Image (spheres, helix red, strand yellow):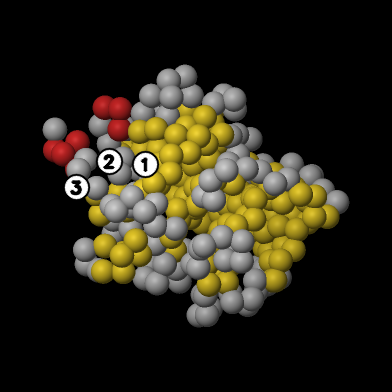
């Protein structure tokens, strides 16, 4: 099994709280990005003390209340399935806070982390604030929900987006990378991909590779899997009949998404 591909772990860590994924700097090669998926049964509360990390709490599905013990946002979350293709609500909580996530209905919640020292205000990022972008042409069309783009100064390091790629299409394509801290040409951002497919028996292919091919892995990614992108290009191809959803978390030393296209494939943009 690839070191970059994570299957759901589904560990019940408390009654009604299932830790589906847990990517940390201890169990991966990532330094800047941490990622969890938790499933909560209705009425159950998950609590976490952040320490020196900031967190973007994304209501992937279901309704939740989120509190940093100072401010509380109630009944947030907009969809039963990501494939309703509606943006959802999220909450940014800065380092050194304790937060509670209480499930109003059964809920799947993504917790996106990055190391952080400087406190910023807790903030509701409402669904209506998500910039919805249609990118690409032909079989490269995809739709993006910008939850925490680099134009939004709410976070110190985190960048968070959702991407929907229709049947037979490609995204993160032509292949691009962001693994050099060399602005203004390119930024260094690690990344995680949390994938879902509709219908759920579907799969996508994701390749992660570097110019020198010291890393070159092509993964068959199934519903609920996470792909870790420490470096390299990371295109996604979606087979006919299936729609792909993924939630991207990116972070690095500078909060700028400046990518570099693979020169071998950049011509695709110029057709
Ligand atoms: O435009 C896309 O296809 C989405 C990707 O850019 C994705 O968010 C990513 O690769 C980030 O580096």
Earlier in the chain: of badge 1 and badge 2, it is: 2
Q: Is residue 152 above or below residue 96?
A: above
Q: Left of 198 or right of it: where is 106?
A: right
The residue pinned by badge 3 equals 263
Classify mark 1: helix, strand or loop: loop
Q: CA distance from mark 1 to mark 3?
A: 14 Å
Q: Nearer the viewer, residue 248 or 81?
A: 248
Residue visible at 32% across and 32% down?
A: 141
Q: Quadrant of the C terminus?
A: top left
Residue 51 in percent (x, y) is at: 64, 76
Earlier in the chain: of badge 1 and badge 3, it is: 1
The residue pinned by badge 2 equals 174
Q: CA distance from mark 1 to mark 2?
A: 7 Å
Q: CA distance from mark 3 to mark 2?
A: 9 Å
Q: How many marks?
A: 3
Residue visible at 47% across and 32% down?
A: 204
């Amino acid at each position: 099994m690839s070191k970059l591909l994570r299957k759901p772990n589904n560990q019940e860590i408390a009654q009604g709280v299932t830790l589906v994924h847990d990517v940390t700097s201890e169990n991966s090669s990532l330094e800047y990005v941490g990622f969890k998926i938790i499933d909560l049964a209705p009425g159950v509360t998950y609590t976490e003390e952040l320490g020196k990390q900031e967190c973007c709490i994304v209501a992937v599905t279901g309704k939740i209340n989120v509190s940093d013990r100072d401010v509380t946002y109630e009944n947030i979350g907009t969809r039963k399935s990501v494939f309703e293709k509606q943006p959802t609500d999220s909450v940014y909580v800065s380092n050194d806070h304790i937060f509670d996530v209480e499930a109003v209905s059964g809920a799947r919640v993504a917790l996106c982390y990055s190391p952080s020292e400087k406190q910023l205000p807790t903030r509701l990022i409402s669904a209506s604030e998500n910039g919805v972008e249609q990118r690409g042409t032909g079989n490269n069309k995809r739709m993006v929900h910008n939850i925490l783009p680099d134009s939004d100064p709410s976070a110190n390091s985190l960048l968070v987006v959702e991407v929907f790629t229709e049947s037979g299409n490609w995204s993160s394509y032509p292949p691009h990378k962001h693994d050099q801290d060399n602005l203004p040409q390119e930024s260094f951002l690690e990344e995680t991909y949390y994938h879902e497919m509709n219908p759920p028996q579907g799969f996508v292919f994701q390749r992660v590779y570097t110019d020198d091919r010291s890393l070159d892995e092509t993964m068959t990614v199934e519903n609920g899997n996470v792909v870790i992108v420490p470096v390299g290009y990371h295109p996604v191809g979606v087979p006919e009949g299936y729609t792909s959803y993924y939630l991207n978390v990116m972070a690095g030393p500078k909060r700028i998404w400046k990518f570099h296209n693979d020169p071998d494939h950049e011509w695709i943009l110029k057709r």
